[in-house]
């Protein structure tokens, strides 16, 4: 195979677009967490056994999250183009891709935050209540702190998922590695280039995964070594 | 005493679930005086946890109110209640420590809630860890400690904000007998040294005998009996109390079948004389020893024995009189058959 030749020929393009991909993935993950964390926390707090049960709010968020999660990403991307245009001013390019990525990832992240937080031992929460802690303190100093390694694993999964979405966004002019694969690999029949990009994406997911697991383990003090 | 430290006034608690309602507490009233080590004992499901959780309003009573130092918890706002809870600390069966925080941070946690500055909190936390014998574990995480050590951390944490009251819900139930003894000794020391009133929930009579001065027996949501531990042990008035007293050795009610059963209690004056042997010799009639145990409680031997007396009614009456003359408490267990059916 002539992967080496491919690399030599396209290295500038690949490196530049790896940078764009990472930019889109990292920024949209951060923004999605900014939205997903409060929603996840609200889901936990308002659930039946939560700190402040509220059927109405829980249902509302629950349905909202489910609806967005059940829309396939490519369709969501097209559906919200008007919103994207409103926010970014255009519907193509890395910044425009970030909008649908955030839209798609936030509900997914909300669910993961929810499932990490509900796992926190109820006894510890009760102990904090018995000390006179406010719900705010319980959420941030007890639940988030106790669930931190599970939250990190969630973040790793979120990153890998968003990376996948971002490659898909390439199909509709999002730029990044997915875009290169389509423009050069698919339309110009450069299959070797496509394979190189796939390998790069797989490696990125592997690195993220390994790093996430490593941090998660390191932060988890429940296991004695 | 003018006013008790804790007054439980006609507290009822009803849990409504989808398919049924449970009346966990039925019109419970109790007074707990300052300095008491007050035991609350009962079978599983009796309502002990619910009752103790009403003492800091983690559970809000459906009816009735709880007064601490004369202040009504029911009339407090959420903010006042949170402030009040710093005065009523709690420890739990499963310790409930923050597993992702160090021992030191765990002990500092209630002080952080109370907005004590960090360095003051750490200084006090180290003193408390020293008091519970764990100052060398300050940097360790709970998972690296034994159960007994984790409970000591929980006790240090409970003391952090200088509470007046310490509630213990089955605090020794997850520990082995030796560790249980150590934790109970520590609680006793805390009661004496800091004058902290302690409420101990347990299903083990031995725990009550070990450190409590008062005891309330909870049976299916009501207070079956309340009084000094020695009085209740020597002369239980209720079936529930009798069951618990008989279970004080092994934790189980011994199986006893047959008629004419009596329970006798030895006190310090009587335990040296071989009463039962002498009685058998005197009346020339055998008795069946169904069950016996002895405990040394604070230097006082407390023993109990269940005897099956002969069928002859006149002889039986004489024997009971003989035992009573020797200053033994004697109770006829006419309702023992009922006990056999109860499992705990
Ligand atoms: N949150 C709840 N919802 C519904 N029922 C409850 C709830 N908490 C307690 N109960 C019921 O109330 C009764 C008393 O429970 P409680 O936990 O106080 O018993 P307990 O004496 O502490 O028992 P154990 O020794 O097993 O801990 C039980 O029948 C229990 O099922
Ligand atoms: Mg209980």
Image (cartoon, coloured by chain):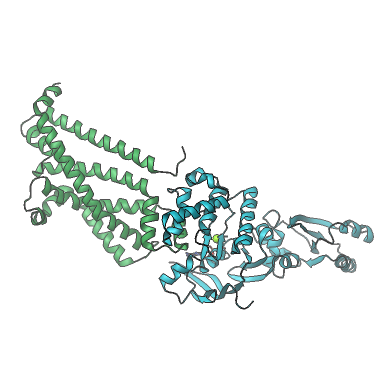
Q: Residue B233, how many percent across, how many down?
A: 73, 64
Give the left or right position of residue A108, taking residue B75 as reference. left
**Vertical placement of residue A209 versus B224, above or below:** above
Q: Nearer the viewer, residue B321 or B288?
A: B321
Residue drawn 32% across the image and 45% down it: A152
Relative to A127, say whether A203 is above or below.
Answer: above
Q: Is residue B284 left or right of residue B174?
A: right
The image quadrant that residue B329 belongs to is bottom right
Tell me if I can see residue B35 in this picture.
yes
Instruction: Quadrant for the N terminus of chain B, please.
Output: bottom right
Rendered cyan, the chain in question is B
Q: Which residue occupies 18% across, 40% down?
A: A22
Could you tell me if residue B205 is visible in this image? Answer: no
Corner quadrant of residue A211: top left
Image quadrant assignment for residue A192: top left
The percent coordinates of residue A171 (x first, y second) are 10, 42
Q: Residue A182 at x, y = what percent?
A: 10, 37
In the rendered image of the structure, the colour used to display chain A is: green
């Amino acid at each position: 195979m002539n992967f080496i030749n491919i690399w030599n020929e396209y290295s500038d393009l690949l490196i530049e677009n790896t940078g764009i991909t990472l930019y889109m993935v990292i920024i949209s993950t951060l923004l999605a967490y900014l939205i997903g964390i409060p929603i996840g926390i609200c889901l936990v707090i308002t659930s039946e056994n939560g700190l402040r049960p509220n059927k109405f709010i829980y249902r509302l968020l629950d349905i909202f999250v489910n609806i967005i999660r059940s829309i396939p990403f490519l369709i969501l991307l097209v559906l919200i183009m008007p919103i994207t245009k409103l926010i970014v001013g255009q519907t193509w390019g890395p910044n425009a891709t970030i909008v649908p990525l955030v839209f798609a990832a936030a509900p997914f992240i909300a669910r993961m935050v929810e499932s990490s937080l509900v796992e926190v031992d109820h006894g510890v929460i009760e102990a904090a209540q018995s000390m006179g802690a406010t719900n705010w303190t319980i959420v941030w100093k007890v639940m988030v702190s106790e669930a931190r390694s599970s939250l990190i694993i969630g973040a790793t999964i979120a990153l890998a998922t968003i990376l996948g979405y971002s490659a898909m966004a390439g199909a509709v002019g999002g730029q990044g590695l997915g875009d290169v694969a389509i423009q050069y690999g698919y339309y110009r029949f450069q299959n070797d280039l496509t394979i190189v990009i796939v390998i790069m994406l797989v490696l990125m997911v592997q690195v993220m995964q390994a790093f996430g697991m490593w941090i998660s383990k390191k932060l988890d003090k429940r296991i004695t070594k | 005493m003018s006013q008790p430290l804790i007054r439980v006034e006609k507290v009822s608690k009803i849990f409504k679930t989808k398919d049924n309602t449970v009346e966990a507490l039925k019109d419970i009233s109790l007074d707990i005086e300052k300095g008491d080590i007050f035991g609350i004992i009962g079978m599983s499901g009796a309502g002990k946890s619910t009752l103790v959780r009403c003492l800091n309003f983690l559970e809000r009573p459906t009816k009735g109110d709880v007064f601490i130092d004369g202040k009504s918890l029911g009339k407090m706002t959420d903010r006042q209640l949170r402030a009040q809870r710093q005065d009523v600390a709690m420890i739990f069966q499963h310790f409930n420590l923050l597993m992702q925080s160090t021992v030191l941070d765990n002990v500092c946690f209630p002080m952080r809630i109370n907005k004590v500055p960090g360095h003051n909190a750490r200084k006090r936390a180290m003193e408390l860890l020293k008091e519970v014998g764990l100052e060398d574990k300050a940097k360790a995480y709970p998972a690296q400690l034994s159960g007994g050590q984790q409970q000591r951390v929980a006790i240090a944490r409970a003391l952090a904000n200088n509470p007046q009251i310490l509630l213990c819900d089955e605090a020794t139930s997850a520990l082995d007998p030796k560790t249980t003894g150590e934790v109970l000794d520590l609680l006793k020391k805390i009661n004496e040294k800091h004058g902290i009133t302690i409420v101990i929930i347990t299903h083990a009579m031995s725990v009550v005998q070990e450190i409590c001065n008062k005891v309330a027996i909870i049976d299916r949501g009501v207070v079956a009996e309340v009084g000094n531990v020695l009085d209740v042990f020597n002369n239980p008035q209720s079936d529930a109390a009798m069951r618990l007293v008989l279970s004080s050795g092994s934790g189980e009610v011994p199986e006893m079948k047959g008629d004419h059963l009596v329970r006798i209690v030895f006190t310090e004056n009587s335990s040296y004389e071989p009463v039962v042997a002498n009685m058998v010799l005197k009346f020339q009639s055998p008795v069946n020893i169904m069950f016996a145990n002895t405990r040394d409680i604070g230097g006082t031997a407390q023993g109990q024995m269940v005897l099956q007396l002969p069928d002859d009614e006149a002889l039986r009456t004489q024997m009971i009189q003989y035992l009573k003359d020797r200053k033994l408490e004697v109770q006829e267990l006419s309702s023992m058959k009922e006990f056999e059916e109860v499992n705990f």
